[in-house]
Structure formats: structure tokens, C-alpha cells
């Protein structure tokens, strides 16, 4: 049984959470201010503290030193709706600091309490405290900017377009936005590139029985399935141009009609789309109608490639190994020199490639020393192919052609970050914008 101090100024939240903790068989004291919490801490010894950051008479951080001085092993969890606070205090306090996101579920409480009662079990569990918005791992500047954008757009119903290289984690970002939005509906994910051209309308909007050959029953489309939730359209730029007006009409009218029906239905969901193409490539290659682009990309978000946030690689390694240890009930680690090698590699396949590499190394682990075996060569055949494509300069290209390819390749390599691209190329930001504008005029 744990002895828990719950500190939060939300009376309803305190009452509900106390009820859950009591139901789990633990002892609970509550406080709604720093002063009352200090009085409890002075007279009692606690195993766990659930602590709000912002209290009427000060910050919950004021309690940390007092609590840890009395019991260094005490387990403390901050209660917050903003996961980005992790990066602010992560370096100030020890590993016993956890984070619980409101609304707190019974599963969250069970996980927090179970982690601290069993050191062996803690080693097996994925490092959930590393996760932002329950899905994303990383504390680099690029990820902090991403977290801020997620927090801002989560407070609205705006459609979002995610842009990033293959393997950079677009589906995880979509799930993070859905999680942060706290909407009652579910997240429905579909890959537009996997649809057969003659079935796209059926997949998006649904169909009635007998609407076409093979329609043996009524089917709800993905817009209906995502009602009051989030619809994630991955690889949206792979949708045939002649079918895009139907998607545009649904977004504009917020209504759909199943194939074979005359009845329109209102829809209510946020649409998050994703592509591994840059904005310039989308326009130049005419992958999306302009009017559809503006409907989908109300709030565009660029996901940084892993090579631009190498400081996050140790956290990702810890997270992935934690997941694998939990899955297989083992305690496999990594040598410092192997981790250093992983941090030095450029990871053209991004987080997906890192995860694949670690999974293979985990399977081949040295069981005697409980350490993963990292292969001598990290490069994949796909990475080599991409390098060969991007580095080729063919006969007959003008200087302007080569310059244009260099600028666009650099911009794509840096995930659309124009300032970083200008710095890398030795150009002023104004010059870079002038070049990009001239390319758009040439293609139009």
C-alpha cells in the first residue's frame, strides 16, 4: 500500500482522483495549496506525491526540496496539461520525477504506482516519462518548437498538414495532436496512396448496399468513423488529381454523401494530412490542387529530420530499448561506444530506421553481457540509392539548374527550415526567398 499526498487546487479533480486511489487500496491525504501541502509533509512520510505546478499560493516546485530532503526515494509526479514543462525541470531534479497528463486515467495511476514498487518491473517498462503528448520523444530545440505548435493547434479545430521526410514520425505527430486535443471521438488513420482509384470515394465517404458491384453491405466512410475525433490522411499528395474535388467539397461543406445515397450527412472532425514532399515540390509537381492545399494546410507543421536533432538519439535509444525490454521481459542495454556510433550516423531513414536498427541489434544481443550488438555498417541500401540520386550532375545541365537543385535538395534535407538552409548554403534569407519565388514563377 502506498501513502500518497495529492496536491491540486481543482476540488473536483482532487475528489475524483482520491476516489480512484482509495479504490486501488492506497492511503491518501489531499491539499489545495502549497501551505497545506507543507503542513502535511511536515507531519507525515509519503511514498508518492501527485503535484500540480500552479497553485493559489505559489508553485508546486517549492515543495520539491522539502519532500526529497525528508525522503530521497519518494516518487513525485507532476500533474499537468502541458508536457513541454518536462524540458524545463528535467535537468534540475532526479529520475524519480514523473509526469501525468490531465485528465488522469486509472491506467495512468496504476502505471505510476506500479513502476515505483518494483525496480525489476521498472526496467521492463517503456520509458513513458520520456514521452510528450503520450507519443513523442525528444528534448531538442526542434522538438520543443514542434511541441509548442502542437499545443497551440490542439486548442483549435484547424486542419493540419504535416510535412517531413519518410520515417520522421508523421503518424506519431498526428496521434500527439489528437491526444492533446482531448476530443471524444477516435483517431482514424488511412493511407491515401494505398487506395485503389475506383474505391477512393467509397473509402472516404462510405457507400450503401448495392451502390456498385461488390458492395454487399452498407459501409461508413472514414469521415463518419472519425466523427468528433481526428481523421489522418497519410500520403495525401498521392491522391489522383481528378478525385481531389470531392475531398475539397467535403471539407468546404462539412458534409458527405455515401455512394448510392441521396442523403447528406454533417461531419465534424479535424483533418490532419501528411506528405513527404515539400511545399515547393507539391506546387511544381502539381500533386495537389491549390484550393485543396489551402483547405488542408490551414496550419502546416514541419517535422525535423533526425539528423537535425541528434541530441534526441540517446532518448530515443532509451525509449526503444525500454519498449523491447518490456515486450520480451529482458534487461538488454547498450555500450556507450555503440550509442556514440548511433549518435554520429546521419539516419537518412530517420526515426523509423533507428528503430529498425535497434530491433535487429536487440534480436542479435549478447545474452551473456545483456547488450545489443550494433552492426559494423549502419548504411541501408535505400540510403545509398537516395544518395546516388541526389548527388548526380548530368551533362547538359546549366549552372542555374544545378543551383536550383542544390537549393531545393538542401531545403528538403533540412525539413523545410529556410533559415537553416540559407545558413548552410551561405546565402542571406532574403536571397533564398528571392530564388524560391523565381522558381515558383518559372513553374507557373
Image (spheres, grey):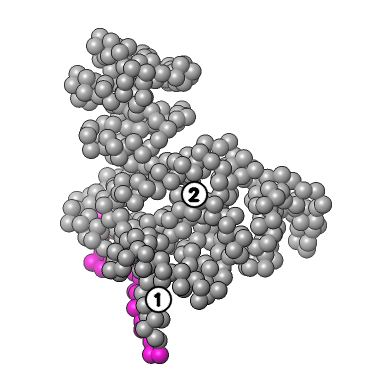
Q: Nearer the viewer, residue 122 or 169?
A: 169
Q: Quadrant of residue 289?
A: bottom right
Residue 326 appears in the picture as rendered: no
Name the mark nearer the viewer: 2 or 1.
1
Q: Position of residue 431 (x, y in %)?
A: 36, 68
Give the residue at x 46% y 73%. 439
Q: Which residue does the numbered mark 1 point to in the structure image?
A: 404
Res. 198 image quadrant: bottom right
For this rendering, which residue is in front, 296 or 210? 296
**Residue 294 at what x, y percent from top left?**
57, 57
Q: Where residue 75 sits in the image (x, y, percent)? A: 28, 26
In the picture, measured across the screen, residue 369 lies left or right of residue 151, that is left
Residue 336 drawn above or below residue 66:
below
Left or right: 407, with 423 as reference point: right
Residue 128 - label: none
Q: Quadrant of the N terminus?
A: top left
Q: Secondary structure at mark 1?
A: helix
Q: Residues within 10 Å of mark 1 (few under 14, many from 20)?
A: some
Circle 2 sits on which residue?
A: 174
Residue 305 located left or right of residue 365: right
Residue sitting at 78 percent across and 63 percent down? 213
Determine the residue located farthest toward the bottom in the rendered image. 396
For the point 40% across and 48% down, the residue is: 146
Q: In what element is the residue under mark 2?
A: helix
Q: Looking at the picture, does residue 156 appear above or below residue 312?
A: above
Identity of the residue drawn at 52% across and 75% down: 443
* Mark 2 → mark 1, Cα distance in angstroms: 32 Å
Quadrant of the image for the C terminus?
bottom right
Residue 411 counted in the magenta span: no
Amino acid at each position: 500500500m502506498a501513502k500518497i499526498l495529492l496536491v491540486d487546487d481543482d476540488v473536483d479533480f482532487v475528489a475524483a482522483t482520491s476516489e480512484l486511489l482509495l479504490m486501488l487500496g492506497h492511503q491518501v491525504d489531499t491539499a489545495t495549496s502549497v501551505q497545506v501541502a507543507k503542513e502535511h509533509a511536515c507531519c507525515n512520510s509519503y511514498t508518492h506525491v501527485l503535484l500540480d505546478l500552479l497553485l493559489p499560493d505559489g508553485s508546486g516546485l517549492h515543495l520539491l526540496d522539502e519532500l526529497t530532503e525528508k525522503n530521497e526515494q519518494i516518487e513525485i509526479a507532476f500533474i499537468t496539461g502541458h508536457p513541454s514543462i518536462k524540458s524545463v525541470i528535467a535537468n534540475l531534479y532526479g529520475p524519480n520525477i514523473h509526469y501525468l497528463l490531465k485528465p488522469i486515467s486509472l491506467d495512468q495511476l496504476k502505471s505510476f504506482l506500479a513502476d515505483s514498487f518494483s525496480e525489476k518491473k521498472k526496467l521492463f517498462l517503456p520509458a513513458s516519462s520520456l514521452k510528450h503528448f503520450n507519443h513523442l520523444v525528444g528534448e531538442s530545440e526542434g522538438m520543443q518548437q514542434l511541441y509548442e505548435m502542437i499545443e497551440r493547434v490542439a486548442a483549435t479545430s484547424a486542419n493540419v498538414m504535416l510535412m517531413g521526410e519518410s520515417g520522421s514520425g508523421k503518424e506519431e505527430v498526428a496521434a500527439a495532436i489528437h491526444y492533446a486535443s482531448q476530443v471524444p471521438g477516435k483517431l482514424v488513420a488511412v493511407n491515401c496512396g494505398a487506395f485503389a482509384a475506383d474505391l477512393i470515394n467509397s473509402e472516404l465517404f462510405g457507400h450503401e448496399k448495392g451502390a456498385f458491384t461488390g458492395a454487399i453491405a452498407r459501409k461508413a466512410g472514414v469521415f463518419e468513423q472519425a466523427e468528433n475525433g481526428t481523421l489522418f490522411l497519410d500520403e495525401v499528395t498521392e491522391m489522383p488529381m481528378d478525385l481531389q474535388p470531392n475531398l475539397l467539397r467535403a471539407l468546404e461543406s462539412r458534409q458527405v454523401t455515401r455512394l448510392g445515397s441521396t442523403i447528406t450527412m454533417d461531419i465534424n472532425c479535424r483533418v490532419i494530412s501528411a506528405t513527404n514532399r515539400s511545399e515547393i515540390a507539391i506546387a511544381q509537381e502539381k500533386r495537389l490542387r491549390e484550393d485543396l492545399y489551402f483547405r488542408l494546410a490551414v496550419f502546416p507543421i514541419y517535422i525535423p529530420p533526425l539528423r537535425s536533432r541528434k541530441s534526441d538519439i540517446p532518448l530515443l535509444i532509451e525509449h526503444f530499448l525500454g519498449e523491447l525490454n518490456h515486450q520480451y521481459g529482458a534487461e538488454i542495454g547498450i555500450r556507450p561506444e555503440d550509442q556514440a556510433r548511433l549518435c554520429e550516423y546521419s539516419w537518412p531513414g530517420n526515426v523509423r530506421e533507428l528503430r529498425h536498427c535497434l530491433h535487429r541489434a536487440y534480436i542479435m544481443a549478447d545474452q551473456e553481457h545483456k547488450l545489443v550488438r550494433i552492426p559494423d555498417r549502419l548504411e541501408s541500401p535505400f540510403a545509398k540509392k537516395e544518395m546516388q540520386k541526389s548527388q548526380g550532375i548530368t551533362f547538359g545541365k546549366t549552372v542555374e539548374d544545378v543551383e536550383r537543385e542544390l537549393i531545393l535538395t538542401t531545403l528538403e534535407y533540412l525539413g523545410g527550415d529556410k533559415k537553416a538552409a540559407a545558413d548552410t548554403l551561405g546565402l542571406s534569407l532574403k536571397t533564398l526567398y528571392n530564388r524560391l519565388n523565381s522558381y515558383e514563377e518559372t513553374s507557373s
